[in-house]
Image (cartoon, rainbow, N blue to C red):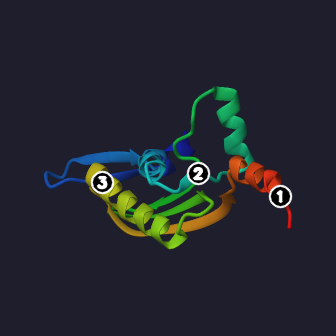
Amino acid sequence: MENEEQELQEITTQNDESIRIANEVVASIAGVAVSEVPGVYGMAGGISSGISEVLSGKKNLAKGIKVDVTEKETKIDVNIVVEYGTRIPDVAFEIQKRVKKAVETMTGLKVISVNIHIQGINIAENRDNKEKTEPQE
């Protein structure tokens, strides 16, 4: 129970009322925003997130995302795998823009940084098959 308390961040509104937002909620909002960016193949998460997805049967929207939420602001780290052939700086910029907008709009927190970590590149199978069938010179 104490661990859950640490993961919830309290935001004080204008009327001195408070809203508590779990770090997992911020991570899920960011995850949805990232998944909508063209050129992103998927999120790169650890082994534990992969196992939990298999056991629960649910897609983990926060996979590959780490958030550090303080009282009024947040820092977000995103770990992704990109599609082969996409321009990585363009994909990273689009992720930063969409994540910042989504989190700030939905939570009222100020996003002070969105750090993108490219963990891999997905090379499509059809590209591999094409290279195998082309005649060698």
As drawn, the label of residue 135 is 1
Residue 41: x and y, percent? 58, 51
Q: CA distance from mark 3 to mark 2?
A: 34 Å
Question: Which element is circle 1 on?
Answer: loop
| Position of 64 relative to 49 (above/below) | below
Going by the numbered disc 3, the residue's amino acid type is: Ile
**Image-based side of 26 in relation to 4, left or right:** left
Which one is closest to the eye, mark 1 or mark 2?
A: 1
Q: Residues within 10 Å of mark 1 (few under 14, many from 20)?
A: few
Q: CA distance from mark 1 to mark 2?
A: 30 Å
Query: Is tag 3's residue or tag 2's residue first in the polypeptide sequence?
Result: 3
Going by the numbered disc 1, the residue's amino acid type is: Pro
Question: Which element is circle 2 on?
Answer: strand
User: Which residue is tagged 2?
Assistant: 41
Asked if marks 1 and 3 touch (Cβ < 8 Å), the reply is no
Residue 103: x and y, percent? 35, 54
Which residue shows up at 56% across the image and 46% down it?
3
